[in-house]
Image: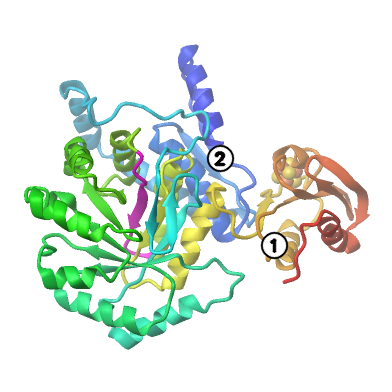
């Protein structure tokens, strides 16, 4: 959808046509999935400056679509409605020389290709290259003691194996006491999951005592500009830390983007490996694009980070920012942070965003139309019923469409389709092929399950 709108815009520009564009993600589905898919598709285009009106199509009653559309559009309307912003942007655009050394378009906006990187280790796990996009889970721990943190982690580690599992746990480190607390947790909890420490600005990493503790963890996050002026001790520290199973993440701010070429030269001259990058700033999507441009052809993996004040804002904004980057091939891992959030909720949201970009499918993907006057059955009830029966299947796409007029075309990439064919009748599809015609709706769910079984894609829940 994003690529098609970009193509349309490019063609308009070529032909000097200037019609407004109406954006929508068709067949987004319902619930969290529908909201995430709509945010990614519509938001990625609004971030590109494409789109004048939007529609959100959920498999839910229409009244639920309006607040979702507002949440997606608000950020862009806020900027536009403030005349001072517009004036300021025009002034900047006209007066400032374009900083080409910071960003030139390097992506192909019309097709997907993953940003090139080597892989690196985080404990026993590897990330980057063409590996799965990894999920780092930020575990809030500020108000908790060691036993409470252990109990939170045990809940996550022992969760139902059918649910997506955590891969890396990360913790903010603000003071020495945090380091000691986490070391105690690490030693008491027996887990294969790597720990990542986010070392906040100004932390003294050159102290031997600190280094001894840090060395027990598999990844650390640093702001390199805090240390780069002490080249020798910094190089010694990085060589000491980045060993066989450990990596350092450099978290770059907007003002630090400029030091990346110097930083990369420094790493190369000291033969330091196992480095990845992340970005922290106001404009996440554009900041990461600049970071990716700076790292282009340099093979460092990129971790996408999004911090939000609450889980609902995170759902919309992280979908737009991180989802928008992922569909352009940028990002080898993601980390969501919401102070005080339930870690299980954050973990699910991380995998839901990856699922919606289709870069990491961890459960059944449902495609369902929003329903209209042509719908031949109760779409919401049917979708919920089929979800209940097939939701445990990993990695397959099932479409539930209201009619045969538009349904087959709009579910074209689904593995299986359940399409209304007439009152009380359903056609069942395997890919684009009709496998069973006019199946009575009372037995259509069972016939769909049979079809999935015949194709060897069924597993018992
Ligand atoms: S019933 Fe048919 S036309 Fe209506 S929304 Fe569903 S697929 Fe589209």
Viewer-closest of 305 and 21: 305
Q: Going 22% across and 68% down the picture, which residue do you hit?
A: 214
Q: For the residue carrying disc 2, how many other residues have a C-alpha within 10 Å: few (<14), some (14-19), or many (20+)?
A: many
**Quarter containing ligand 1?**
top right
Residue 393's mark?
Answer: 1
SS class of the residue under badge 1?
Answer: loop
Q: Position of residue 50 (x, y in %)?
A: 44, 31
Quarter holding residue 177: bottom left
Which residue range is magenta in the image? Answer: 299-310
Q: Please check the rendered image and state whether residue 454 is part of the magenta-colored stretch, yes or no.
A: no
- Which quadrant holds the N terminus? top right
- Which quadrant holds the C terminus? bottom right
Tell which tag, 2 or 1, sits nearer the viewer. Answer: 1
Q: Position of residue 25 (x, y in %)?
A: 57, 42
Q: Position of residue 319 (x, y in %)?
A: 45, 51
Viewer-closest of 80 and 283: 283
Residue 78 in view here? yes
Q: Going 58% across and 76% down the picture, which residue do you hit?
A: 160
- 87 to the left or right of 278: left
Task: Count numbered badges in the picture.
Answer: 2
Q: Going 19% across and 53% down the picture, which residue do you hit?
A: 223
Residue 315 in view here? no
Residue where numbered disc 2 is placed:
24
- The reply to whether callout 2 and callout 1 are in contact (CB within 8 Å) is no
- Image vertical order of residue 269 relative to residue 31, above or below: above
Circle nearer the N terminus (2, 1): 2
């Amino acid at each position: 959808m994003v690529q098609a709108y970009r193509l349309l815009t490019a063609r308009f520009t070529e032909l000097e046509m200037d019609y407004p564009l109406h954006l929508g993600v068709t067949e987004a589905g319902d619930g969290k999935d529908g909201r995430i898919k709509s945010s990614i598709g519509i938001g990625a285009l609004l971030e590109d400056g494409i789109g004048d009106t939007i529609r959100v199509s959920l498999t839910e009653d229409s009244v639920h679509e309006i607040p979702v559309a507002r949440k997606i559009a608000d950020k862009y309307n806020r900027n536009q409605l403030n005349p001072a912003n517009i004036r300021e942007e025009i002034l900047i655009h006209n007066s400032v020389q374009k900083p080409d050394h910071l960003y030139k378009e390097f992506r192909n906006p019309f097709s997907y290709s993953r940003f090139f990187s080597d892989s690196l280790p985080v404990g026993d796990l590897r990330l980057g290259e063409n590996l799965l996009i990894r999920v780092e889970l930020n575990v809030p721990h500020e108000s908790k003691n060691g036993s409470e943190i252990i109990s939170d982690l045990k809940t996550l580690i022992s969760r139902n194996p059918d649910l997506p599992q955590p891969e890396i746990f990360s913790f903010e480190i603000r003071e020495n006491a945090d380091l000691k607390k986490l070391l105690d947790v690490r030693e008491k909890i027996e887990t294969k999951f790597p720990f990542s420490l986010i070392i906040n600005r100004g932390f003294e990493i050159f102290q031997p005592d600190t280094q001894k503790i840090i060395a027990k963890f598999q990844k650390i996050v640093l702001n390199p500009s805090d240390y780069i002026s002490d080249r020798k001790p910094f190089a010694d520290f990085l060589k000491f830390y980045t060993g066989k199973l450990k990596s350092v993440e450099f978290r770059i701010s907007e003002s630090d983007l400029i030091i990346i070429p110097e930083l990369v030269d420094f790493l190369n001259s000291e033969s330091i490996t196992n480095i990845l990058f992340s970005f922290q700033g106001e404009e996440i999507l554009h900041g990461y694009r600049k970071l990716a441009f700076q790292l282009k052809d340099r093979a460092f993996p990129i971790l996408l980070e999004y911090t939000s004040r609450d889980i609902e804002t995170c759902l919309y904004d992280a979908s737009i920012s991180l989802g928008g980057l992922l569909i352009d091939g940028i990002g080898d891992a993601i980390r969501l942070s919401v102070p005080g959030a339930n870690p299980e909720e954050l973990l699910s949201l991380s995998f839901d965003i990856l699922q919606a970009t289709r870069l990491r499918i961890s459960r059944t993907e449902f495609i369902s139309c929003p329903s209209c006057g042509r719908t031949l059955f109760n779409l919401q009830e049917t979708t919920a019923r089929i979800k209940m029966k097939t939701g445990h299947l990993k990695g397959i796409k099932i479409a539930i469409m209201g009619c045969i007029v538009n349904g087959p075309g709009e579910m074209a990439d689904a593995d299986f389709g359940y399409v209304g064919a007439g009152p009380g009748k359903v056609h069942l599809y395997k890919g684009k092929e009709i496998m069973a015609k006019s199946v009575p709706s009372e037995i259509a769910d069972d016939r769909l399950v049979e079809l999935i079984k015949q194709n060897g894609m069924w597993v018992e829940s």
